[in-house]
């Protein structure tokens, strides 16, 4: 869509400045745009920000991964070319800390839902698992809207945690090409070492990896030579790797934006493809699964407290750990849940109405009583003191 927008604007004689967040995406965007055009300048934000005075003034600025748009570096570019039209694109229109884009945008246009994109084959269907992991986040500090990364890294970078991740991969995604999201560079490197020791072709890639090595790792992954590629935040945005069949989340996050960007990285469409998402840190219980609807706005997303879980109604199967929208049977393994009507009402967000109806029914039951014995039966069933029986009998004028 943006490639079409850029070409058409350029063909009309307009100067287009196309901003990319990471250099890994330059070739990808250039391929989408097609033949080079003299009126289209394709560059990274980092490359252009210190040479704005040497840049031809654009008529249109198109910015990819626009949730970064309010950062100082980006604002410097937008402010310098304030007379240009600005179009920003992102799957998650808020910063990682939840801040919105209202300071730089006049209008937010919401695209089709994930469910719609899956049904129309623009995204791959998915299976989402949240197997239990031996970690405790209760005492972890939150900074800038997310868990303190240094503390998270210490918790996650443990042999028994990585061992569980390998176990989950073998059980749920064996043989599939997977990207792992870790909490720190050392955590990622150690995780890769463990996967290699377990017999898998794996590599760690980060922003400091020499460009030649990074390109080679990505090429090896695309060709199938590498089965596992681990990173911290390098592959959280925009990277077009249709060969990714699975993701393993080993970084707990309070950021909805980060969760969406990472968890859906395996959902590029492919013939017969079903993405596997292994959420080993329970991020879905804070943010939902890929087709959970979110209310985006220019004011951003509301921040949750560390202990607060999502209210979107995600059910985790106790048998296979498959996560899905509420139903009485696990759609993956067929496990039958045994929930009370009150639990179902609470999960559906209808507990208040249920309690009101429950109280009404209780009053009606008492109202139908005509003998002391009937009142006593209710008292025993509900755990009431026998004084309640005397009061009710007096109110209802029951003598026997």
Image (tube, grey):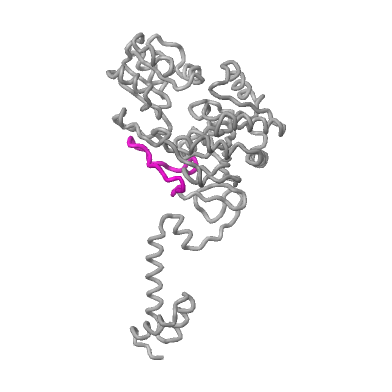
Q: Is residue 278 visible?
A: yes
Does 394 lie within the magenta span? no
Q: Which one is nearer the viewer's eye here, 371 or 99? A: 99
Indicate left or right for 66 with 328 as reference: left
Does 297 lie within the magenta span? yes
**Relative image position of residue 122 (x, y in whole percent):** 49, 32
Residue numbers of the magenta segment:
288-311
Locate residue 360: give its quadrant.
bottom left
Q: How many marks?
A: 0
- Check the picture and name the quadrant holding the N terminus: top left
Identify the residue at horizontal 63%, vertical 38% (top origin).
Answer: 158
Q: Which one is nearer the viewer's eye here, 150 or 128? A: 150
Identify the residue at horizontal 65%, vertical 26% (top origin).
Answer: 226
Q: Which one is nearer the viewer's eye here, 81 or 187? A: 187
* 29 shown above or below 291: above
**Relative image position of residue 317 (x, y in whole percent):** 57, 51
**Relative image position of residue 203 (x, y in whole percent):** 63, 26
* 269 shown above or below 315: above
Locate residue 9: give its quadrant.
top left
Q: Is residue 115 visible?
A: no
Q: Main secondary structure of the magenta part?
A: loop
- Check the picture and name the quadrant holding the C terminus: bottom left
**Relative image position of residue 391 (x, y in whole percent):** 37, 83
- Residue sitting farthest toward the bottom: 400
* 65 shown above or below 398: above
Identify the residue at horizontal 46%, vertical 62% (top origin).
Answer: 342
């Amino acid at each position: 869509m943006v490639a079409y927008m850029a070409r058409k604007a350029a063909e009309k004689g307009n100067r287009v400045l196309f901003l990319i967040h990471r250099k890994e995406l330059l070739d990808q965007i250039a391929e989408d745009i097609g033949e080079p055009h003299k009126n289209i300048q394709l560059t990274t934000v980092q490359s252009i920000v210190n040479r704005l005075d040497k840049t031809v003034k654009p008529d249109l600025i198109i910015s990819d991964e626009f949730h970064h748009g309010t950062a100082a570096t980006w604002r410097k570019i937008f402010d310098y070319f304030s007379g240009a039209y600005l179009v920003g694109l992102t799957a998650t229109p808020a910063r990682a800390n939840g801040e919105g884009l209202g300071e730089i945008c006049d209008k937010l246009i919401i695209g089709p839902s994930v469910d719609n994109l899956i049904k129309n084959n623009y995204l791959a269907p998915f299976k989402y698992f949240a197997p239990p992991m031996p970690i405790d986040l209760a005492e972890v500090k939150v900074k800038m809207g997310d868990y303190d990364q240094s503390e998270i890294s210490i918790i996650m970078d443990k042999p028994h945690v990585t061992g569980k991740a390998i176990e989950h991969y073998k059980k749920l995604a064996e043989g599939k090409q997977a990207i792992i999201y870790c909490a720190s560079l050392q955590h990622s490197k150690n995780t890769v070492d463990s996967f290699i020791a377990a017999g898998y072709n794996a590599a760690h890639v980060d922003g400091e990896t020499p460009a030649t090595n990074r390109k080679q790792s990505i090429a090896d992954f695309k060709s199938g030579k590498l089965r596992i590629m681990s990173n911290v935040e390098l592959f959280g945005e925009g990277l077009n790797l249709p060969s990714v069949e699975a993701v393993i989340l080993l970084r707990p996050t309070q950021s909805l934006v980060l969760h969406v960007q990472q968890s859906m990285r395996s959902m590029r469409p492919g013939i017969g493809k079903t993405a596997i998402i292994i959420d080993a840190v329970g991020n879905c219980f804070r943010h939902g699964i890929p087709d959970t609807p979110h209310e985006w706005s220019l004011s951003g997303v509301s921040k949750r407290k560390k202990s607060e879980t999502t209210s979107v109604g995600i059910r985790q199967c106790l048998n296979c750990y498959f996560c899905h929208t509420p139903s009485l049977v696990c759609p993956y393994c067929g496990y039958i849940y045994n929930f009370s009507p009150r639990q179902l009402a609470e999960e559906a967000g209808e507990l208040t109405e249920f309690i009101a109806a429950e109280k009404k029914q209780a009053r009606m039951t008492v109202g139908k009583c005509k003998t002391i014995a009937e009142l006593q039966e209710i008292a025993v069933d509900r755990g009431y003191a026998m004084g309640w029986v005397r009061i009710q009998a007096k109110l209802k004028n029951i003598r026997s």
